[in-house]
Image: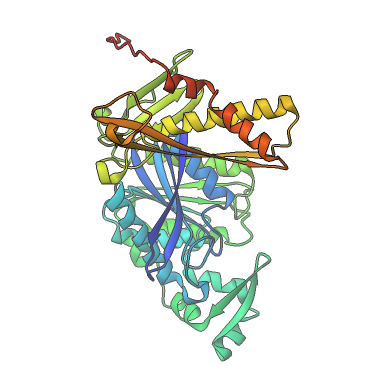
Amino acid sequence: MTVKSEKLTFPGSQGHGLAARLDRPEVEPAAYALFAHCFTCGKDVFAAQRIATTLAERGIAVLRFDFTGLGHSDGEFANTNFSSNVADLVAAADHLRREYAAPQLLIGHSLGGAAVIAAAPKMPEARAVATIAAPADPEHVGKLFTAERAAIESEGEAEVDLAGRKFRIRKQFLDDIQVQSLDDALGGLRKALMVFHGPRDAIVGIDNATHIFTAAKHPKSFVSLDDADHLLSRKADASYVAQVLGAWAARYIEVPPAERRTEVPPAMEGGVVVQETGEGRFTNAVVAGRHRLRADEPVEVGGTDTGPSPYDYLLAGLGACSAMTVRLYAERKGWPVERVTVRLTHDKIHADDCADCETREGKVDVIHRRIAFDGALDETQRKRLLEIADKCPVHRTLTSEVRIHTEPDSH
């Protein structure tokens, strides 16, 4: 199944913009999941990418984001703690609930695993929780900077080195993790739990998985990751977790009726297929050969803005054709064109306002095209390239007589 990755931003618990990615199938997702990354990592760490992509291929959309002060998110990391991470997760779930659908699956890696356990009671729609190499106690993370702990306690903050990167840790972070406990959350989870952990994990020992599993009530499952490292840095380990997670989650996730899920239409040789997806009033899947695209309308006109509009595609076709035609001509002439940039807009004007139009009544479509050429060209060459752009096949199609024949399709 084709996967689409969208960049998103939503407000976090401290009011800062949090950078996120939504990995989703081209069809209507069967459900949504929320992924929490490991301590000081980010949404783009390899394990997060692999797991999100694999789940999306199985029909489950996954939102992964950078906690406040990390990755591409705004805010200062020194002002965050375990509680703020939990609050960021709740904000992420609120965003999904508001814009798409509430998450039914929660996934957390390392400290992110502890965070999803703590946040789960605040997400009533969540039906399943999965932890990967998670500590049973958030205070476990304090062991990563034992040497600097005295300085943090006495001076209020200190710079620590974590996996080769510098982070500023403040006393409020230590105070926060000291009062956290996951036992109550685990005992009252009331959601299916999957615990992934490697017995050779050198960062978070396997005894943490034992504690989590014992404290939780059924339904619960445990999968040993054999010799996988803490970060699941090997592709095979991350893929294994994703595959098992997808199969396990299918037992607990509410799948919408088939009529709400539209499969991507098959390609048509020598043509384009466009089919409604059922996700919004105007959302369509576009299949051109092996390429899978989307078409939609902006929110202000009733769409969901998940893809370019029909006129955007029209302008894109003309712009691409113009650039390609110019490129071929410049290469044949040996002219030093380094890059061609085409900017296009579309308007409708009254025929009376168009001095050189044959149409005299109603409105006329006008496409404004501006072309820039990078390279050491003289004015004569630039003028000639503009003339050549008018000779591109799409330009000729748009400015010549076009007939469109419409007939029923029996598939």
**Residue 346 placed where, x, y %?**
38, 37
**Residue 286 placed where, x, y %?**
40, 27
Q: Is residue 114 above or below residue 353?
A: below
Identified at 44% across, 33% down, the residue is: 315
| Of residues 77 and 203, the one drawn nearer to the viewer in this rendering | 77
| Of residues 14 and 108, the one drawn nearer to the viewer in this rendering | 14
Q: Residue furthest front?
A: 355
Q: Is residue 176 left or right of residue 165?
A: left
Identified at 62% across, 29% down, the residue is: 326
**Residue 393 placed where, x, y %?**
52, 20
Instruction: Confirm whether residue 190 shows in the render.
Output: yes
Q: Quadrant of the N terminus?
A: top left
Q: How is the image coloured?
A: rainbow
Residue 121 placement: quadrant:
bottom left
Q: Is residue 264 above or below residue 77?
A: above
| Of residues 342 and 24, the one drawn nearer to the viewer in this rendering | 342
Identified at 62% across, 78% down, the residue is: 159
Q: Residue furthest right?
A: 334
Q: Is residue 194 left or right of residue 97?
A: right
Q: Quadrant of the C terminus?
A: top left
Residue 153 placement: quadrant:
bottom right
Identified at 56% across, 48% down, the residue is: 47
**Residue 176 placed where, x, y %?**
44, 77
